[in-house]
Amino acid sequence: MKNIFTALAIASISASNAVSFENFGASKSRPDERFADGEANFKLAMEKLLQEYMDQGISKEELYRGATAGMLATLNAGDNSWNTLLTPRDVKEIQSDLSGQVSGIGVALKFDETTGHAQIINVIPNSPSEKSGLKQDDQILSVDGKRYKGKQFRDIVGAIRGKVGESISLKVLREDKVISMRVKRQAIPWTPVELSKIDRSTQLLTIGYFTNETPRLVERNMAAINSDETKNLIIDLRDNSGGDFEKAVQTAELFVPKGKVIVGTKGRQGKVQTISSKRGLLKPGVNIVLLTDYGTSSGAELFAGALREGLSAKIVGQGTFGKWNVQTIQTLSNGFAIKYSVMSFQTPDGKTYQDTGLKPDVEVAMPAGTEAKQLQSKYDIPKRLELDPQLKAATELVRAM
C-alpha cells in the first residue's frame, strides 16, 4: 500500500494512511449478543478496574478515553479506521492541512515498508530541509532522539511539525552513513494546485488535495485552460487522498456543466440527495483524461467519478482506493475530537465504488520504487514524460481523443 505524507502540508486524513488510535481490544465487527443494561454494567466494569486492576496507576481519564475510542472502533468494518478518536494535536494538524499552510521543515515523505522508516521523496526548494542538507532518499531514523521505526506514520509527521522557529534534531540514514543534523521549523505554504503545459494544445492540471483554497486556485487557472489553444486537459489526481468533501464538490463544479449532477449522497435515513453543478466554467469540447492510482481516495474519487460521467473523461493509471464515505469531526470540550461517518456518496449515475475503487480505462503501472509525487516535483515536463509511463499514456490518449 502506498503511504505518502508531507511533513509540510499533506499529513491528511488519507485513505492510504488512515490514522489508527487505541482500540483497547474493541471488536471490529458488531457483536451478535446484546450487551443488556449497558450503562449499569459499564459503571460496574469501570469500578472493578479502578479497584482491582493490577496496575494501581490506572485512572478514570484513561478509561473514559479508552471507552470513547472503543465506541468509535466498534463502528469500523474490516481494517478501516474512519471512525476514530483524534487527539488535540491531530485536530490541529487536520486544520493546518485544510488551510494549506503548516509549520514544518519542507519535505515530502513516504513510508518504506522494507526498512520501516520514513523516506524523503522530495525536498522543497528554499525550505529549512534543503538549507540543512537533507536529501531525497534519506531515511529518517529518529526525531529529537525518539525512534519511529514501524510506528504509525502520522506520529512521524506530528513529531516533525511543531512551533515555528523551534529546531528539531534528526538522525537520517544516507546510503550506509548515519548523519545527525538540526533543522528549524518555519511556516511553509503548500499549493495543492499546479498548471503546466505539455504542448501547445495540452494542459496538465495537478490537484494534490482538496483544501479550503483548492476551488479558488483551480478557478484562477480556468482562463488558461479555456484559452483558444487548449484542446486537451490532463488532470493528475494521483496520491490525492481527498480532503474537504465540500471543496471537492466545488472544484468539480468548475468543470461539470451547469445543471448536471456532480454527486449523490446517502445518510442514515437512506434517502439519496443529489448535488448539481451551478457553474460549469470549462469551455465545450475539451478532451479530458484523469490520472489516478491507489492513493487517489475519497474526495478525489468523487471528483473523478463526476468528470467521468459528466464529461466523458477517461481514466489512466491504476485503480483508486475505494473510500466512498464522508466523515465529520466533532470537537469535544477537552480538545479531543471524534471523527465519524455521516454519509456515503455515489456517482451521478448512482454507482458507488466503496472498497473496489474506480477502474481505469487504460491501466498503466508505475515502475517499482517510482513515486508520482517525486517526478512531479523534481523534473520538467519532457523528462517526466520520459520517466512517468502513466503521464505518457495519458498524453497519448488525450491527443487521440
Image (cartoon, rainbow, N blue to C red):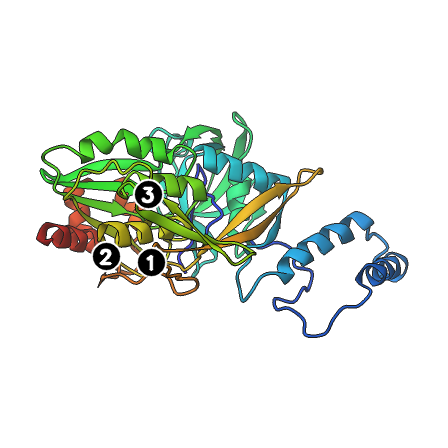
Q: Which mark is residue 316?
A: 2
The front one of 148 and 64 is 64
First in sequence, mark 3 or 1: give its number: 3
Residue 281 image-quadrant placement: top left
Q: Residue 386 placed where, x, y %?
A: 15, 50
Kind of residue at disc 3 = Ala
Label 1 element class: loop
Label disc, if present, on residue 115 of the rendered structure: none
In this rendering, the label closer to the viewer, 1 or 2: 1
Instruction: Tell me, yes or no, whether the two marked residues, 3 and 1, touch with CB atoms within 8 Å.
Output: no
Give the crowd class for mark 3: few <14, some 14-19, many >=20 residues within 10 Å: many
Residue 100 image point, x, y percent: 43, 33
Along the line of sight, which residue is nearer the eye, 159 or 28?
28
Marks 1 and 2, the one that precedes in the sequence: 2
Let me know if residue 94 appears in the view: yes
Q: Decide if residue 6 is in sight here.
A: no
- Left or right of 207? Residue 222 is left
Point 48% across, 57% down: residue:
116
Looking at the rendered image, the quarter that the N terminus falls into is: bottom left
Relative to residue 370, is residue 127 depicted above or below?
Answer: above
- Cα distance between the residues tagged 3 and 1: 16 Å
**Residue to which mark 3 is pinned:** 252
Mark 3, mark 1: which one is toward the viewer?
1
Residue underneath mark 1? 349
Measured in 3D between alpha carbons, the distance from the residue under mark 1 to the one under mark 2, in whole angstroms, is 21 Å
Residue at the outermost bottom position: 32
Q: Please, what is the three-letter code of the amino acid marked with disc 2?
A: Val
Between label 2 and label 3, give the one nearer the viewer: 3
